[in-house]
Image (cartoon, rainbow, N blue to C red):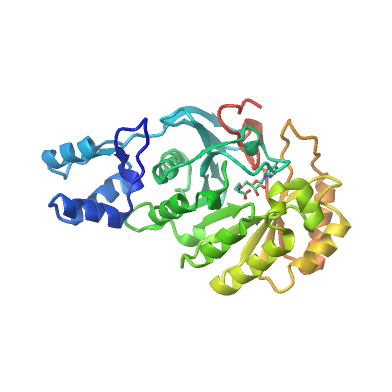
Amino acid sequence: MVKNQLQQKEDVRNLSYDELVKYFEGIGEKSFRATQIFEWIYQKGVWSFDDMSNLPKSLRDRLKQDFDLQPNTIADKQISKEGTTKFLFDLYDHEKIESVLIPTETRTTACISTQAGCKFGCRFCASGIGGWNRNLSCAEIVTQVLHVREESKKHERPLSNIVFMGTGEPLDNFQNLMKAIRIINSDKAINIGARHITVSTVGLVPKIKELAQQGIQIELAISLHGYDNESRNLLMPVNRKYPFDELIEACREYVKATKRQITFEYIMIKDVTCTDKAVVSLKKAFKGIICKMNLIPYNPVSEFDHKTPSQSEMQKFRDRLEEFGVHATIRTPRGRDVGAACGQLRHASQNSK
Ligand code: SAH
């Protein structure tokens, strides 16, 4: 089990349902106690063992002795004009991470972080600027969801979707990510359908292969952003390790193995990614892959001098892709005014931009 120096005890949210059952068996308790704990934490949303009123006092004391159940401290909360809410959490070691609640007319989405910082240094993204410090634990991942869900109650629709598109690279924290996904998906816990959970990746080829073997129907989104090897090398250093063609091949295999469609995310940067050459190259790359494209208007990050194309340039780019038989939609930027849009989440508290 993962205990760290500053924490005295294991966080109970680092345990899967089966691990919790084993724990209760180990202390001579019935296994339905695991169901009760899951209900209290993930369904009723309590933050303390003392609030678990159907557990005997002696058992609550034992749990307090054995486990931690701390909320991630909310250090700041900013609400954009369209209702997108960005949380800044202060973790036990004072690492800061961000999560976002995105309410729209059709759904309410939580955008969740998986690492404090990011190793991958994409040359358009704020999250990698301060470097990488550590992986988030399963508890730190699911606790973000619990806070965002609580906030979502102020809006019309309950929390319906989870996207792992906050700071960090989800597939670089594979074990904790998968454990958290199973809790988020479990009908004993947060109970969000697998098809409403999206994992976004810079394209870690071996991990995409591993994900295909997990037997879970989640959505996979690939941050592609380049249209061939050369253009992707310039924007995403990870492409030198897992080149464009290898990544596309892994996506083809993923679709075959899982029978699931893949989403390619593609940033529209003026004169860089939004060109005729790109349209031709993408059509060739996507041949035989069941996929769609999510076109993301470049969100300004002060450290980079890219420009966002005009509305009509972006529209034209989308139309050309559609003509070429690639299904593409333009993602509406949300939360730009509070630095909560794609690529604007920052490492530590450098989020004053
Ligand atoms: N590391 C994962 C998860 C982060 S998802 C990944 O890269 O997929 C965040 C999404 O926002 C990614 O698609 C990322 O490429 C995109 N993004 C990063 N910087 C951006 C920017 N300045 N404007 C628009 N989208 C950006």
* Depth check, front residue: 183 or 211: 211
Does any portion of residue 330 appear in the rendered image? no
Whether residue 298 sits left or right of residue 48 in the image: it is right
The image position of residue 45, as x and y in percent, is: 33, 42
Image quadrant holding the C terminus, namely: top right
In the picture, measured across the screen, residue 43 lies left or right of residue 105, that is left
Residue 128 drawn above or below residue 320? above
Which quadrant of the view contains residue 140? top left
- Where does residue 335 sit, x and y in percent of width and height? 62, 37
Foreground residue among 262 and 328 = 262
Q: Between residues 279 and 78, which one lies in front from this camera angle?
A: 279
Can residue 231 be seen? yes
- Occupied quadrant, residue 343: top right
Residue 30 position within the rendered picture, expressed as x and y whole percent measured from the top left: 15, 55
Q: Position of residue 163 (x, y in %)?
A: 54, 50
Residue 179 position (above or below residue 4): below
Residue 327, quarter of the rendered image: bottom right
Q: Which residue shows up at 17% across the image and 52% down it?
A: 26
Determine whether, in the image, residue 67 is placed left or right of residue 6.
Answer: left
Which residue is drawn at the image coordinates 68% and 40% (left, top)? 125
